[in-house]
Image (cartoon, rainbow, N blue to C red):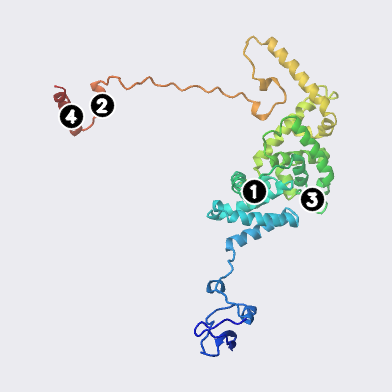
């Protein structure tokens, strides 16, 4: 129904097409009823719908360049880690939510890069996907403690509760696939199938867990130590002299940097600890009869140790208790030995006794001590200070009188 004219009140109002804009015009007085209304859509022009000016000039907000680059980087991380399309979409949505949060919006670019890695780690843990924090740090070339701090901030800011966490065994299988030991990559003497490497490394990792070598440790150095010793033990005579550095170069493992998942010296320490524990079990093997077992040649006995590990552990602990009792009986002193030294296999934190904290001596000063004149004079250096001091002392004496 056409509107009535606002000027004369007539009902004879017709449509008049002016260029592409349709207008309502009164035939009696000639006044234009609707004029100056802007439209942006052809359908709105056809049906003469009034569009407000602020709606016609509204522009869709485009994401900032850093957000676009961050989404590209996050999707690249997902493809490197071989995540599914659904997980990749969840990571992108989580990163977009976290990027717009006030806690991360004004952060520096490095923090936003680590935020993308934290989003990948969060989604992986929600889906029980075996990815370690050190792996994310190695891919981003960032410090794992810094990524861990941002990961905790992400969980607190967005109220994310990750209840699932990957076990060492799941991480080990993924870690073994990073070593390129195919016939096309390495010489025949160093070739090893992934299935055999995973099987032997898993057995070594379970033994390390029984010997308290896993407690409170970062996963990647320990996993590298298990894979390295397992690889040596499969062909010990040919691979015994191959160092960790050469093994990583042969397997095309990325360089162990301080900013990555671990440092090389950390992995070397884990190898030394695992070899030392294997030596303790190897000395109990009955056919060796207590002979010398060296860490450099322990890889030749790994298969036998893993086959009888339960029996060897019990026998080694029993022998250690007997030796300790004999030492206590022969020792003249009655000093109590730390419990970490009385047991053969203990957690890393209990191997050395903690030093007792000594209370620092508190000076007996209450503020009422008499200060001698010679001590006061030792603090006064210039004649002007002596003059000022004498004047102040004179005034104090006069006030007392």
Identify residue for label 1: 137
The image quarter in which residue 367 lies:
top left
Query: In the displayed structure, would residue 360 be above or below residue 82?
Result: above
Residue at screen point 63% across, 25% down: 352
Query: Counting residues from the N terminus, which is met first, the one under dot 4 or under dot 3?
Result: 3
Measure how far apart labels 1 and 3 are at the Cα level. Answer: 28 Å
Query: Counting residues from the N terminus, which is met first, the one under dot 1 or under dot 2?
Result: 1
Measure how far apart labels 2 and 3 are at the Cα level. Answer: 79 Å
Res 392 label: 4
Query: Counting residues from the N terminus, which is met first, the one under dot 2 or under dot 3?
Result: 3
Query: Counting residues from the N terminus, which is met first, the one under dot 4 or under dot 1?
Result: 1
Query: Counting residues from the N terminus, which is met first, the one under dot 1 or under dot 3?
Result: 1
The image quarter in which residue 297 lies:
top right
Identify residue for label 3: 186
Q: Are marks 4 and 1 in contact (CB under 8 Å)?
A: no
| Quadrant where the C terminus is found in the figure | top left
Residue nearest the viewer, comparing 112 with 198: 112
Query: In the displayed structure, would residue 275 be above or below residue 108?
Result: above
Query: Counting residues from the N terminus, which is met first, the one under dot 4 or under dot 2?
Result: 2
Residue at screen point 59% across, 63% down: 63
On the image, the x and y values in percent for residue 247 come to 74, 45
On the image, the x and y values in percent for residue 233 come to 81, 38
Lateral position of residue 59 relative to residue 173, left or right: left
Residue nearest the viewer, comparing 84 with 245: 84
């Amino acid at each position: 129904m056409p509107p009535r004219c606002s000027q004369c009140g007539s009902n004879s109002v017709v449509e008049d097409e002016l260029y592409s804009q349709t207008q309502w015009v009164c035939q009696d007085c000639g006044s234009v009823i609707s004029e100056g209304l802007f439209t942006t859509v052809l359908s709105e022009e056809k049906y003469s719908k009034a569009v407000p000016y602020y709606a016609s000039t509204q522009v869709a907000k485009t994401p900032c360049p850093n957000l676009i680059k961050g989404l590209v980087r996050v999707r690249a991380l997902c493809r490197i880690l071989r995540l599914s399309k659904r997980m990749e979409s969840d990571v992108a949505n989580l990163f977009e939510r976290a990027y717009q949060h006030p806690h991360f919006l004004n952060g520096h670019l490095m923090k936003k890069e680590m935020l993308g890695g934290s989003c990948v780690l969060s989604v992986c843990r929600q889906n029980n996907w075996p990815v370690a924090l050190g792996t994310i740090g190695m891919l981003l070339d960032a410090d794992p403690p810094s990524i861990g701090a941002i990961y905790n901030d992400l969980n607190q800011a967005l109220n994310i509760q990750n209840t699932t966490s990957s076990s060492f065994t799941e991480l080990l299988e993924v870690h073994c696939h990073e070593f390129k030991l195919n016939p096309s990559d390495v010489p025949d003497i160093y070739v090893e199938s992934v299935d055999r490497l995973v099987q032997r490394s898993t057995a070594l990792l379970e033994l390390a867990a029984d010997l308290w070598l896993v407690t409170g440790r970062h996963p990647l150095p320990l996993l590298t130590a298990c894979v390295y010793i397992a690889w040596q033990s499969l062909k010990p005579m040919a691979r015994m002299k191959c160092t960790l550095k050469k093994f990583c170069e042969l397997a095309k493992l990325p360089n162990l940097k301080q900013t990555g998942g671990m440092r090389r010296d950390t992995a070397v320490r884990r190898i030394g600890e695992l070899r030392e524990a294997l030596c303790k079990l190897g000395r109990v093997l009955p056919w060796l009869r207590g002979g010398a077992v060296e860490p450099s040649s322990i890889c030749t006995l790994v298969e036998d140790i893993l086959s009888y590990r339960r029996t060897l552990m019990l026998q080694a602990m029993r022998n250690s208790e007997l030796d300790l009792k004999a030492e206590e009986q022969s020792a003249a002193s009655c000093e109590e030995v730390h419990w970490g030294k009385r047991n053969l296999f203990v957690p890393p934190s209990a191997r050395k006794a903690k030093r007792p904290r000594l209370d620092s001596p508190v000076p007996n000063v209450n503020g009422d001590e008499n200060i001698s004149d010679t001590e006061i004079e030792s603090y006064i250096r210039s004649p002007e200070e002596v003059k000022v001091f004498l004047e102040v002392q004179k005034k104090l004496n006069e006030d007392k009188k």
